[in-house]
Image (cartoon, rainbow, N blue to C red):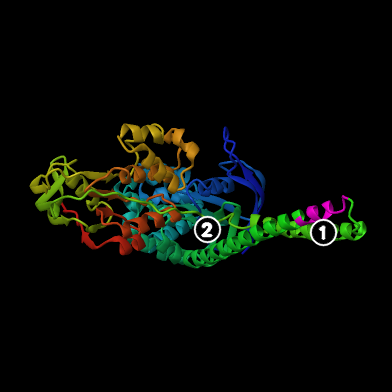
Amino acid sequence: MSIIQIEDLSFTYPGSVYPVFENCTFTMDTDWRLGLVGRNGRGKTTLMHLLDGTLRGTGRVTASVGFDYFPFAFPCGLSARRAMKRAVAHFEEMEAEMARLLALGESGVGAWGEAEQRYAAAGGYEIDAQLEKEAGEMGFPAGDLERPVESFSPGERTRLMLGAMFLRRSRFLLIDEPTNHLDREGRERVADYLRRKKGFLLVSHDRWFLDQTVDHICALHKSGVHVEQGNYSSYAANKARQDAFEIERNERLQGDIRRLEETAREKAAWSDRVEDTKIGGHTFDRGAVGHKAAKMMKRSLAIERRTEAMIEEKKALLKDIEYASALTLHPLTHPARVLVRLTDAAAGYDGRVVIGPVNLEIAQGERIAVSGGNGQGKSTLLKLILGGLPPMAGRVHRASGLVISALPQLADGFSGTPREVGEREGLDLSYFLMLLRKLDFPREAFERDMTGFSMGQKKKVLVAASMARPAHLYLWDEPLNYIDLPSREQIENMLAETDATLLFVEHDRRFEERIATRRIEIKRIQG
């Protein structure tokens, strides 16, 4: 156990006038399991790259450990065992030498034995045993490690990569959004795995996952970095209480300031009027009058000082409150009760059926969650309903005049600035941009090309574009991937209040449990 000390950390991206970090100072412990939270664009990935040396800022980082970043390049063309081993240490040259000597046959037995001894002395066989142990905890039997990397799904590769990372010694791990390619079962397995580890900084926007895995929160607030003990739920509760206290204190100070300012003006006016009575042909004691005026002015100045003190106190409030305005959705109403009906429908690619037969009715007002493991065909179902895939069998009936708004997983088909996207998609531009602003999207980014956006910012453009398109049916494919926690809660609150019809795929269990009125499970056809 040792301390990681960050002192006066500052960083601004080249060409930008807005610093990401400015004179930030905080500490972490190498035994902690920290959850790193903050709005999209607040600097979570930037902080990780400042720690691992990919980016260079000013200030000082003092640590007795090195830093490793996830995700990293997981090499293809190798078995899972060799790819994991390469991530732990460099045994490739040793293994190549052993293979060469083995090919020499009996004449190379002595040399082979020598190479094998060097391999063992370097910890090669120990690493093999450790790899099998970590892979087993991630759900892979030892035999699976001989499979090529390409044969594993993205979610499975995530689990293999994490298992390899924890085999490195004297390292503090920087784990950036590991849940993006994990289905519910994968998230549960990885959460259980991380709960038994220590020494990492984890970025995740899945509230359940954070609660299962971390014992400290490192929050990137507007005013700097805040670290506290606990999981995400305890942090969120503390933050809500602090925000409520500051809002109440701010409102009380505003009222006190208004009253004091009014009193100060009155006393200053009284002082002026009394002072004026010293002038003229009356027989008043001008000294007494002047004393009275000075006394009133002194009271006025005292009130001003109290007012200024309250204003300074007020300035210290509300700095870290995340304003999350309510989102609005304007769904269309269709005369038909059932919007889509699938009857023994099947779909697939290149002549091979992936899902089906599926029998499904989508009625107006339903919010249906589509569940299933990675690669089971959930996205295929959405494409089938949308019309992007023709049915290979069965029938897909869509109500006459049905308008569908689709939200894809990735922004591959979107380019240009957000303003250009809105114009090209024929959206109500003011409504589209207003939605982005409510999702904490900076106004200056409206005119920036999306290629420079973070993944979270790109996903917000997709979400806002789908919301700004009035429709009878919304098809959303993993809408919360990369989306920050406050924005997730905004979207969740909006959907909970709407009567929109929604079919969605989302692995955030809290979101699904609150939003879904019904749940269906998709299983991929084998063979």
Q: Residue at x 17, y 47 (%)?
A: 385
Q: Tell me the crowding category of disc 2: few under 14, some 14 to 19, or many 20 or more residues within 10 angstroms, Cα based.
A: many
Residue identified by numbered label 1:
298
Closest to the observer: 465 or 303?
Answer: 303
Classify residue 68 as left or right of residue 328: right
**Where is residue 88 drawn, in percent x and y?**
48, 51
**Where is residue 292 drawn, in percent x and y?**
85, 61
**Which stretch appears magenta?**
270-280
Closest to the observer: 132 or 71?
Answer: 71
Q: Tell me the crowding category of disc 1: few under 14, some 14 to 19, or many 20 or more residues within 10 angstroms, Cα based.
A: some
For marks 2 and 1 on the same chain, the one whose residue lies earlier in the sequence: 2
Residue identified by numbered label 2:
200
Disc 2, disc 1: CB below 8 Å?
A: no
Res 95 visible: no
**Where is residue 325 drawn, in percent x and y?**
44, 53
Q: Residue at x 39, y 63 (%)?
A: 137
Determine which quarter of the picture holds residue 264.
bottom right
**Dominant secondary structure of the residues highlighted in magenta in the image:** helix
Q: Is residue 523 above or below residue 400?
A: below
Q: Is 276 within the magenta?
A: yes
Res 450 visible: yes
